[in-house]
Image (cartoon, rainbow, N blue to C red):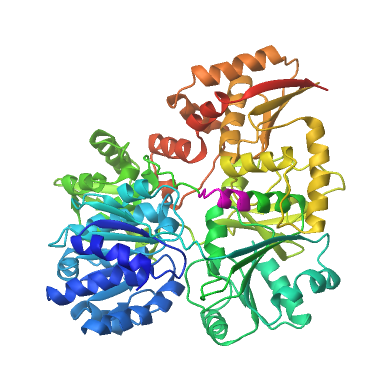
């Protein structure tokens, strides 16, 4: 028995809500289900006893066999429920359920909208809920929806449902436990077995100046020969380029990403389990715990955006006794070299991103109101007020706020009220019925990113937050993606496509970096890497040479941790903060608010133009931000971000709720003030 199972079983048998944290393929599923199955057997529990929740269907398909095999030990079965399962099988399950159901949050929402009577029958005996990859849900709309759905299921169960979360990477497990707790009265446990100190890790950062057969044959092919590997890329087009090139160079290759058909993805997963030499080029679809057998090496084109993703991918290797975990970065630009080193150094310090929990989550609350009204076929005020109970993400929404919210929704003709009962308005009912109410089941749009195309060929993706925050009509929009500077030619908001051309040589982009937000901690680590003379034994000669060049240019400027350098220019200032996207976007918008100036930012700096500006004036503004700016004042900043849409149900929100939601999503005043209170400012003039 593995240590994670020995550590988990006592806590779960005692009845604690628990977070089980262990490495990928560390036996977390068995750690959760051994005691669950024991209780089902010993207490002769009636079905449906346990619900297993996965973030993706592919993982469900993988786990169904595993759960069936575990259940057979005590004579119980498991059923997989998602959109691809036949209606006949679903009907049979609802009439005669198994003890274990494996599903997704969206499928649970579908079940709840079937109505109170069938839900009362199905969920009456639910005793356990197991959430796999819980870190993947925490801090986003799907996680908020999931916690709401669990509370709605709790209303039908005769038990205080025991909640169990599984994860390999958690920065703040106690906060995650509190988030998962909801209205449950059970005790809490965080289970983290001792790390395997004998497990060895091989890490390399290799740099190539160009994607050529010669460079790949020299640096990559030797790593892949006679190995089973995954090669992660940030976009489908790069994954396809990797697969084609590597295959042409003599290593058998396959593709795995969201545009590949389910049949072909499953064929690739099966091949990975069977073959001794195979490289699969993939996007994040392979990051989660789909079982593809023992892998020898993970390759990464450039770098992922978080330490959590890096560790999750690293954990796919080195699972066999006596084998090392093996991860290699293949960097093609300056950004990737710096980011790769920073991720490795933070991981070596045992640092992983913490999850932040928003508390004004009106965008999910309105979806839950619509869904509950549909479930109850008309809901009372008390039933809708109960949606606030036990949910951290609604903590800043009190009863009066919700009543105001409901009044506004009625005024906007989304709800109607008859004899004290809330119903969907005829207009909204008709709109949602066109797709059989399936739009209500998911809190996210199918497209969360903008696809960037050059001559109708996909070159990558941009986060919708970035595009909608920084794109301004009638202004040039230049950005770096995959090492090149691109200029927007056409923005197709309906299809989430950006058509670009190559920017003029020497053009200065608005924004440089990855296509995701870069955190404060990673940005600070990049600053430390640039400003130090530390050597990193895991980077190759080419990467080391590039790092030396970057440092020479950078250190001439004199930036270092704990210092913010302000460059005074003829028409404004550049504030070199290295504080990350969120802090810098907050600062940039406040500067615009106080000065009316044109302001731009990326994760390293904030740049603004202001005629006749002086450092004394800027100093006063910074002091004003540090001492007098309040969270309430941030509501005034929304007018500067334009018509930004970052959530599916945002379009239904009343004005006051949308502002609170956007402020919480876009700005971080506390982190900005903390930054200013812990740095020394140096002023430089050109």
Task: Say which of 599 and 227 sits in front.
Answer: 227
Q: Is residue 209 left or right of residue 80?
A: right
Q: Is residue 356 left or right of residue 556?
A: left
Give the percent coordinates (x, y) of residue 436. Answer: 35, 67
Vertically, is 104 above or below 553? below
Q: Is residue 206 left or right of residue 68?
A: right
Q: Residue at x 78, y 48 (%)?
A: 547
Q: Residue at x 15, y 68 (%)?
A: 125
The C terminus appears in which quarter of the rendering? top right
Residue farthest to the top?
Answer: 616
Task: Say which of 54 and 86 sits in front.
Answer: 54
Give the percent coordinates (x, y) of residue 154. Answer: 20, 58
Predominant SS of the magenta segment? helix
Give the percent coordinates (x, y) of residue 483. Answer: 76, 54
Task: Say which of 482 and 318 sits in front.
Answer: 318
Residue bounds of the magenta highlight: 343-352
Vertically, is 375 above or below 216? above
Q: Is residue 180 visible from the viewing direction of this image?
A: yes
Vertically, is 242 above or below 204? below
Give the percent coordinates (x, y) of residue 71. Answer: 27, 80
Task: Say which of 653 and 532 sits in front.
Answer: 532
Question: Is residue 346 on the magenta stretch?
Answer: yes
The N terminus appears in which quarter of the rendering? bottom left
Question: Is residue 84 on the magenta stretch?
Answer: no
Q: Residue at x 20, y 55 (%)?
A: 378
């Amino acid at each position: 028995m593995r240590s994670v199972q020995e550590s988990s079983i006592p806590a779960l048998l005692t009845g604690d809500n628990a977070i089980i944290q262990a490495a990928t393929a560390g036996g977390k599923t068995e750690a959760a289900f051994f005691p669950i199955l024991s209780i089902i057997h010993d207490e002769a529990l009636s079905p449906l006893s346990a619900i297993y929740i996965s973030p993706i269907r592919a993982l469900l398909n993988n786990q169904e066999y595993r759960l069936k095999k575990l259940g057979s030990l005590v004579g119980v079965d498991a059923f997989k429920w998602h959109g691809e399962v036949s209606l006949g099988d679903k009907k049979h399950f609802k009439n005669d359920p198994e003890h274990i159901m494996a599903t997704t949050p969206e499928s649970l929402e579908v079940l709840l909208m079937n109505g109170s009577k069938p839900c009362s029958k199905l969920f009456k005996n639910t005793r356990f809920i197991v959430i796999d990859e819980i870190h993947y849900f925490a801090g986003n709309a799907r996680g908020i929806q999931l916690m709401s759905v669990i509370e709605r299921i709790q209303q039908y169960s005769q038990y205080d449902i025991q909640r169990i979360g599984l994860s390999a990477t958690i920065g703040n497990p106690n906060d995650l436990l509190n988030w998962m707790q909801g209205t449950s009265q059970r005790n809490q446990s965080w289970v983290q077995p001792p790390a395997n100190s004998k497990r060895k890790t091989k890490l390399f950062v290799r740099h190539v100046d160009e994607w050529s057969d010669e460079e790949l044959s020299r640096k990559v092919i030797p790593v892949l020969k006679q190995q089973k590997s995954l090669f992660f890329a940030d976009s489908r087009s790069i994954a396809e380029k990797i697969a084609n090139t590597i295959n042409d160079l003599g290593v058998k290759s396959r593709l795995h990403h969201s545009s590949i058909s389910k049949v072909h993805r499953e064929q690739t997963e099966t091949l990975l389990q069977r073959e001794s030499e195979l490289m699969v080029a993939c996007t994040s679809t392979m990051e989660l715990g789909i079982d593809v057998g023992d892998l020898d090496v993970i390759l990464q084109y450039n770098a992922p955006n978080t330490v959590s993703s890096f560790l999750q991918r690293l954990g796919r290797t080195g699972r066999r006794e006596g084998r090392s975990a093996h991860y290699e970065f293949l960097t093609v630009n300056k950004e990737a070299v710096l980011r790769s080193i920073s991720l490795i150094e933070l991981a070596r310090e045992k640092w992983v991103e913490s999850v932040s929990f928003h508390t004004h989550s009106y965008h999910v609350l309105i979806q839950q109101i619509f869904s509950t009204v549909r479930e109850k076929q008309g809901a009372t005020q008390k039933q809708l007020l109960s949606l606030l109970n036990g949910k951290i993400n609604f903590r800043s929404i009190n009863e009066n706020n919700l009543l105001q919210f409901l009044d506004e929704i009625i005024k906007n003709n989304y709800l109607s009220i008859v004899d004290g009962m809330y119903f969907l308005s005829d207009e909204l009912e008709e709109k949602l019925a066109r797709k059989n109410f399936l739009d209500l089941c998911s809190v996210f749009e199918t497209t969360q990113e903008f696809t960037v195309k050059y001559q109708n060929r996909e070159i990558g993706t941009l986060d919708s937050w970035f595009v909608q925050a920084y794109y301004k009509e009638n202004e040039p929009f230049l950005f770096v993606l995959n090492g090149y500077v691109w200029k927007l030619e056409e923005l197709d908001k309906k299809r989430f496509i950006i058509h670009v051309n190559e920017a003029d040589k020497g053009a200065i982009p608005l924004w440089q970096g990855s296509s995701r937000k870069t955190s404060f901690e990673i940005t600070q680590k990049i600053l430390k890497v640039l400003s130090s003379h530390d050597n990193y034994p895991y980077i190759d000669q080419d990467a080391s040479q590039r790092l030396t060049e970057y440092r020479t240019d950078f250190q001439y400027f004199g930036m270092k941790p704990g210092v913010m350098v302000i460059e005074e220019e003829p028409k404004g200032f550049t504030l070199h903060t290295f504080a990350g996207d969120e802090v810098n976007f907050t600062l940039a918008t406040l500067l615009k608010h106080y000065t009316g100036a044109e302001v731009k930012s990326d994760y390293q700096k904030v740049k603004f133009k202001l005629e006749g500006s002086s450092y004394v004036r800027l100093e006063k503004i910074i002091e004003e931000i540090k001492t007098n700016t309040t969270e309430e004042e941030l509501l005034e900043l929304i007018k500067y971000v334009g018509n930004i849409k970052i959530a599916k149900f945002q379009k239904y929100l009343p004005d006051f709720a949308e502002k609170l939601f956007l402020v919480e999503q876009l700005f971080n005043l506390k982190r900005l003030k903390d930054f200013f209170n812990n740095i020394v400012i140096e002023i430089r003039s050109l």
